[in-house]
Image (cartoon, grey):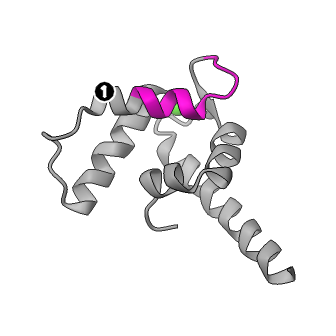
Amino acid sequence: MKQFIYIKRDLKTKLEYAFETYDLDGNGYLDQNEIQTVLVGMLDMLGASKNTHNLNALASQIMKDLDSSQDGRVSKEEFVQKLLTQPSLRSLLNPFI
Ligand SMILES: [Ca+2]
């Protein structure tokens, strides 16, 4: 149990770090453009073709998933909490965690 808590805290730290990396303009929130940029980077890294993905629609869907307060932007709190509870979304946005 102790170990589990340690891992979870470690994951939270990594997610916070990821958020700061993704927040390109450093305003403390992720917008849809920033999420789309992250997706392009992920697909590049994975060697996947971007033509087979509708990036706009995907970014918009992820935005909706992450934006718990529905104010059109994703705070660090929303990002971390959502990704902690949704492994599928987490592996999409950060395959290396
Ligand atoms: Ca931002």
What is the x, y in percent for residue 13? Answer: 68, 62
The residue under the point 65% across, 44% down is: 82
What is the x, y in percent for residue 6? Answer: 78, 76
Q: Which residue is mark 1?
A: 56
Q: Name the amino acid, label 1.
A: Asn
Residue span colored magenta: 60-71
The residue under the point 30% across, 50% down is: 41
Q: Is residue 36 above or below residue 6?
A: above
Quarter of the image holding residue 66? top right
Is 70 in the magenta? Answer: yes
User: Is residue 34 visible to us here?
Assistant: yes
Residue furthest toward the right?
2
What is the x, y in percent for residue 14? Answer: 61, 63
68 left or right of 40 in image? right
Is 9 in the magenta? Answer: no
Quarter of the image holding residue 74? top right
75 left or right of 24 in image? right
